[in-house]
Image: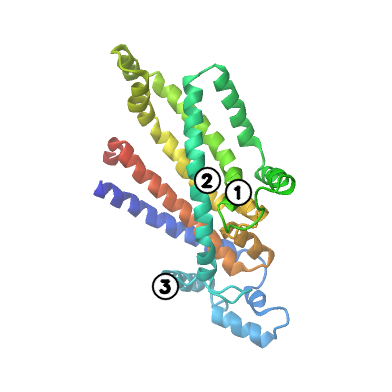
Amino acid sequence: MLSYIIRRLLVCIPTVFLVITLVFFAFQLIPGDAALIFAGEQASQEQIAQIRSDLGLDKPVFEQYSIYLQRLLKGDMGKSAITGRPVFLEIKSRFFNTVRLAVVATVVSSIFGIVFGTISALKREKPADYVISVLSIFGISIPSFWLALLLMYFFSVKLKLLPTTGNASLKHYIMPTIVLSVYSIAFIARMTRSSLFEILGEDYVRTAREKGMKERIVIAKHVLRNALIPVITVVGLQFGYLLGGAVVTETVFAWPGLGRLLVTSVEQRDLMVVQGVLLVFATSFVLVNLLIDLLYGLVDPRIRFN
């Protein structure tokens, strides 16, 4: 298992390096003067030139890239042009708010998605299967911003049961979690259903049933366990999606996370913060995929020897 982990880490390192490289050079193509944004419109040409020199923007692109890598190794992502604080601190103050919301939404969507998918597979072509299939299509199709506004209208404006913004209490988690979970529940349910269909037709499942093994033991021991690998893939990818894709939800509910920070920074043209947030999102997604690979090795030992 240790050698498998080392192999996956060795694959992950160049991927992260590629992400860093792509993010850096993508921002070189954005029009505008970062030094002017940082200095402000009222700054003199001498001040702008000094800031450009301090930021290393007067150097060739590849030399800037080398300096950028050296700073990243030291944990330095630059400074915010708006607040003047280090970008690392701006991200750190909001990162765990996004992670907590993503974890809660992933747990909720995994539980309901697997349960609904299992029921749908076991009740194939019965009313329960049709109902869950229709709800899954609805969950995948509904726009997140529309669902968020709908929930706010009913639970906050009409019923006055839930707060609309912030993250101060458990009540603040309910509506954002629902909005983020609906799509994931539908997607996980459909994947679980398809995976279970495939496993239920295998010879070893029929053999277990013919031996007189109870149905719940067949499902738990032979079917669900072997159907876990594609489901783990979907759950892991959904967690990565929730980390980087909660921008709309965080904006609607004024959730103090990275998604809202990204939107605010784009509006204010705070390029250093935008660059830092995108880098964190992309790196997090790579690390989530690494975790999925490691979970594969735990669920199916055969993968570790491939």
Question: Which of 41/235 is in front?
Answer: 235
Q: Are marks 1 and 3 in contact (CB under 8 Å)?
A: no
For the residues labelled 1 and 3, the Cα–Cα distance comes to 35 Å
> Which residue is located at x 28 percent, y 37 percent?
301
Residue 252 visible, this angle: yes
Q: Please state if 161 lies on the left or on the right of 103 as rendered.
A: right
**Closer to the camera: disc 2 or disc 3?**
2
Q: Is residue 245 above or below residue 235?
A: below
The amino acid at mark 3 is Lys
Q: Is residue 102 above or below residue 193?
A: below
> Which residue is located at x 59 percent, y 64 percent?
274
- Label 3: state its secondary structure: loop
Q: Earlier in the sequence, mark 1 or mark 3?
A: 3
- Label 1: state its secondary structure: helix
Q: Position of residue 133 (x, y in %)?
A: 58, 26
- Label 2: state its secondary structure: helix
The residue beneath circle 1 is: 176
Question: Which of 229/12 is in front?
Answer: 229
Q: Earlier in the sequence, mark 2 or mark 1?
A: 2
The residue beneath circle 3 is: 74
Quarter holding the C terminus is top left
The amino acid at mark 2 is Ala
The residue beneath circle 2 is: 105
Q: Please state if 264 lies on the left or on the right of 88 as rendered.
A: right
> Which residue is located at x 49 percent, y 29 percent?
117
The amino acid at mark 1 is Pro
Q: Are marks 2 and 3 in contact (CB under 8 Å)?
A: no
**Closer to the camera: disc 1 or disc 3?**
1
Mark 2, other Cα within 10 Å: few <14 / some 14–19 / many ≥20: many
> Which residue is located at x 56 percent, y 64 percent?
275
Q: Position of residue 26 (x, y in %)?
A: 57, 61
